[in-house]
Amino acid sequence: MSVLPRLAVGLLMLHAVSAHAIHFDVSISLDNGPVAGSKLITGAFGDLPFDTQPFDHLTGHALFPGDFGDFEGGPRSTDDPGFQAFAGALSGSAGARDYIGFRALGTLQQWTPSSGAWTTADSGVGVRLFGAVPPAVANAYIQSLINPRFAPPGAAAAFNLYSAGTLFTGSGITGPVTATIDDAGSNGAFHAHLDWYIEGAAASGAYMVTLQLTDDASVGGRGLYVDSDPFNVVFNYGLSAAQYETAFFARALAPVPEPAAWMAMLAGLCLCAAAARRARG
């Protein structure tokens, strides 16, 4: 598809989302279905302005957009991207239900208009993600409330740790490194939106976190599947659409000429960001 048709698609999307929040998810599947040894696979789904998944030219990780201050979240929070596994993607069988969670990786990265470059985030700035409390931790805490005399050691402390969320900073990860996203229903599907917050004296800019999906026992899973490849979420915090486009370009494109389709993709992303802001007005 040429640049002009792709931009036309972006304009249609702009019209379509002008009255509501943009909604998008990290899709979840398994390369060989819900059998031991399969690898968790991520993809893009929802109101996204690209046909082909963009990748970070520095790390090779898939890139997903995000926007603190979107229509639903307010100026410092959002629940996008969400996570969605479609029917049949996971096991929902009785006694063999899949729990999928995230693993937080690396350090928080930051782009500001003044620097024009991606760097480690400023001290005191963080992005917090509230995953679900893993089933074993929640059950132990409930038992401690029912009968404190027989409470598992550390039940309350573990519950409080997960309840406080996972914090990404320029120094690394604070709080639980893994947490639950959701468990599959009987049809092998789920759709979950977790809460993301930006904290501290954050300058207007773009902020990037790195995650991977897991079914490790720490999130309630069975440890049958290979963890997904890492992926990045690039959040806008107070940037204009053009500034966010520049920040995204800095990661999505290598510093050499690329096909015109990539230019159209980021133009569409820019239009979507502008649409969300007009919807709030």
Image (spheres, rainbow, N blue to C red):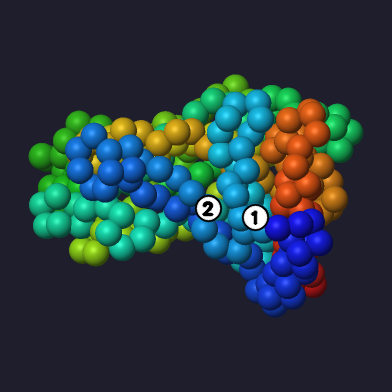
Residue 163, how many percent across, how many down? 40, 45
**Closer-to-camera residue (268/135):** 268
The residue that appears at 12% across and 40% down in the rendered structure is: 149
Q: Tell me whether the residue at label 2 lies in contact with that at label 1, contact meaning CB atoms closer than 8 angstroms.
A: yes
Q: Residues within 10 Å of mark 2 (few under 14, many from 20)?
A: many
- Dot 1 amino acid type: Phe
Task: Where is residue 45? Give x, y as percent.
Answer: 52, 58
Count of numbered marks: 2
The N terminus lies in quadrant: bottom right
Mark 2 to mark 1 CA distance (whole Å): 9 Å
161 in relation to 117, above or below: below
Determine whether, in the image, residue 28 is placed left or right of residue 113. left
Residue 267 can be seen in this image? yes
Q: Identify the residue at the far front of this view.
A: 1
Seen at 79% across and 56% down, the residue is: 3
Left or right of 241: which side holds 125?
left
24 w.r.t. 216: above or below: below
Residue 61, given in percent of the width and then of the height, sits at 56, 33
How crowded pointer 1 is (Cα within 10 Å; few <14, some 14-19, many 20+) is rated as some
User: Residue 154 at what x, y percent from top left?
Assistant: 25, 32
Q: Please, what is the three-letter code of the amino acid marked with disc 2?
A: Ala
- Determine which quarter of the picture holds residue 175: top left
Task: Mark 2 or mark 1: name the one nearer the start of the chain.
Answer: 2
Q: Relative to residue 65, is residue 158 drawn left or right?
A: left
Q: Is residue 160 visible?
A: no
Residue positioned 76% across, 64% down in the render: 5
The residue where tag 1 is placed is: 50
Residue at which label 2 appears: 44
Element under disc 1: loop
Quadrant in which residue 279 is drawn = bottom right
Identify the residue shown where x is 81% and y is 61%. Answer: 4
